[in-house]
Amino acid sequence: MSSLSMEEVQPQLSKRPVGKRVSLLIVGPSMHILGGQAVQVRRLLGILEDVPDIEVTFLPIDPRPPKFLLWVLSIRGLRTVVTFAQYIVRLAWRIPQHEVIHIFSAGLTSYALWTLPALLLGRLWRKKIILNYHDGQGDQHLTEWRTAKPTIALADRVITPSGFLVDVFRKHGIEARAIFNIIDTSRFIYRKRRKLRPIFVTNRILEPLYNVECILRAFVIIQKSYPDATLTIAHDGPSKASLEKMAEDLKLKNTRFIGRVPHEKVTELYDAADIYLTSPNIDNMPVSLLECFATGLPIVATRVGGIPYVATDRESALLVEKNDHEALAACSIELLENEDLVEHITNGGLEAVKRYHPAPVREQWAALYRELAEESRAS
């Protein structure tokens, strides 16, 4: 759960006098969209149920069409047009009814398509706007897209889930602050590990950005020392077919592509493994690392983007340079052969994950919503 138990948290919430409620609209992806943002939206909606003076409405960026139009979901271009039209109509209807607009945002094309309309309509109606930016490609977005900085300036507050993106925004002259992602450790199975089995897992979207190819090349080396080693590759994505072909070409044994694992089954996926591998070329704040901390699963990861802001090398994980499959393999083998190191980094991970428990994150968001609502009422 959290550093505060529910019994400790609930009295704090109930003691707050409920005056005029804050009317909050959260705009973000639903669970129909793969990715960490959708998970964070769902978790935030869940923890805000315990805050009596904040009234929350959720508006998905991917609204489902009515039954008679469900057939459009199978036609890519038409699906986007119909979804976008519904989204704009719902934004135009919902935004005037709320004081504070909390927009979950990725960067680049996704920002232009889904975030920008919410920013513009929010500013048109003079609402208080939070831009909650989740994208490891933020520097590229701010550097290459002329529309990025002037439209981000429409937001009253810029919030990121990591110090990494705070630093990126600062470099571009934009003030941002971090409110961490949420992880509810109560739903995870913590298993203390020392002597590891060569059972590996990875759980990232299968797309070039996350460079699963590096893991497959590392696994070739690992299997030379541990022929019975197994690798489970969870999740789905556009690179799945090419990665399956690569695994076949490399003649990897005991390598399974199991597709997307339902969120409620992820804890079982991690409990079954003994080492977690992730080798992205760029990343923001992968929640999968927090989940590994919460389950006692040792991590070997690339030292890119926001990962060093979440995991400390040889304190809570082992970190290697980008696209270095030899180092990824060497660190994996080191964990298999060094029980003291395993115990040290898993203890460090369990301590590090406390920062992401629901209670402190909820209080930070609630305080920000109240602050903006007061500003709105005073203006």
Image (cartoon, grey):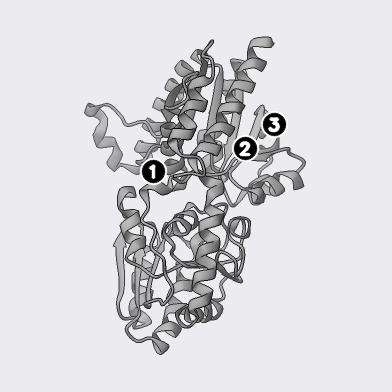
Task: Specify the amino acid type for callout 3.
Answer: Ala
Badge 3, how many Cα within 10 Å: few under 14, some, many 20+? Answer: some
User: Mark 3 or mark 1: which comes first in sequence?
Assistant: 1
Task: Specify the amino acid type for callout 2.
Answer: Ile
Badge 1, how many Cα within 10 Å: few under 14, some, many 20+? Answer: few
User: Residue drawn at (43%, 32%), measured in percent from left and top?
Assistant: 45
User: Mark 3 or mark 2: which comes first in sequence?
Assistant: 3
Query: With 316 as the anchor, is 143 left or right in this view?
Result: right
Give residue 166's mark.
none
* For the residues bearing labels 3 and 1, Cβ distance under 8 angstroms: no
User: Mark 2 or mark 1: which comes first in sequence?
Assistant: 1
Q: Position of residue 212 (x, y in %)?
A: 45, 67
Badge 2, how many Cα within 10 Å: few under 14, some, many 20+? Answer: many
The label nearer to you, 3 versus 2, is: 2
Query: With 142 as the anchor, is 185 left or right in this view?
Result: left
User: Residue drawn at (54%, 31%), measured in percent from left and top?
Assistant: 103
Q: Position of residue 53 (x, y in %)?
A: 50, 18
* For the residues bearing labels 2 and 1, Cβ distance under 8 angstroms: no
User: Residue drawn at (43%, 21%), measured in percent from left and top?
Assistant: 89
Choose top left, top right, bottom left or bottom right for residue 369: top right
Q: Which residue is mark 1?
A: 33
Can residue 29 be spotted in the picture?
A: no
Task: Specify the amino acid type for callout 1.
Answer: Ile
Give SS at disc 2: strand
